[in-house]
Image: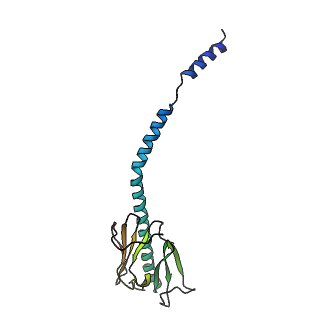
Amino acid sequence: MTESTMIRPIAARARKDESGFSMIELLVVIVIAGILLGAALPAMQKHTGTAKLKQGTDEVASTLKLARQRAVAMNGRVVVQFGRTDSKYWFYLFDDPNESNTRDGNETMSGPFDVPKGIALARIGFDHSRVAFGPRGGASESQTVVLVNGRSDAQTVGVTGATGLVYVSAIHKYEGEEVRRD
């Protein structure tokens, strides 16, 4: 027998003895993976909602702080305006040298910035949904903005009128009126 004829039967025999996963083994693995994914999904959704809430809160607080700093640096007045269009919540800031509390065409504006999807501005305590910062850093009023996610977790961003300092609360459950979510 030649060497090439000896190899063929051995290779054929080896292929017959090779085994992969059976269909039942594969189904068992898929079922176990599905159970694990099903158990992990609620925790992942909670984490995502909390992360978006923190992101939105940070963006609002940062914009308020920027407005205060800008007012002091310019020795002028800067306004932060909050609002809602359809199912989107937004905010922006603008220089307000004529102190009209409304953005005129020639006034510098930053934004609008959208609140992350799934987060609502549940309560805007400022008159006319705006707060103005003056040249000494003080705010037009002491008030808060409450951001809420779909699980009714909330975080509050507040402004102290006399100093214009911005603070952020810890996450808490929102117990105010119903939040409109389109």
Q: Is residue 69 left or right of residue 173?
A: right
Image position, residue 148 (x, y; %): 39, 69
Image position, residue 78 (x, y; %): 46, 83
- What residue appears at the point 47 percent right and 87 percent down from the top-left corner? 101
In this picture, is 164 found above or below 44?
below
- What residue appears at the point 41 percent right and 84 percent down from the top-left corner? 127
In this picture, is 122 found above or below 71?
above
- Foreground residue, 151 or 157? 151
Displayed quadrant of residue 9: top right
In this picture, is 71 found above or below 178?
below
Displayed quadrant of residue 162: bottom left
**Number of dots carrying numbers:** 0
Q: Quadrant of the N terminus?
A: top right
Image position, residue 155 (x, y; %): 36, 69
Image position, residue 154 (x, y; %): 36, 68
Q: Is residue 138 left or right of residue 81?
A: left
- What residue appears at the point 45 percent right and 75 percent down from the top-left corner? 63
Q: Is residue 120 left or right of residue 169?
A: right
Q: What colour scheme governs how the chains and residues are painted in the rendered image of this protein?
A: rainbow
- Foreground residue, 61 or 18? 18
Displayed quadrant of residue 60: bottom left
Find the residue positioned furthest to the top. 1
- What residue appears at the point 42 percent right and 41 percent down from the top-left corner? 32
- Foreground residue, 142 or 34? 34
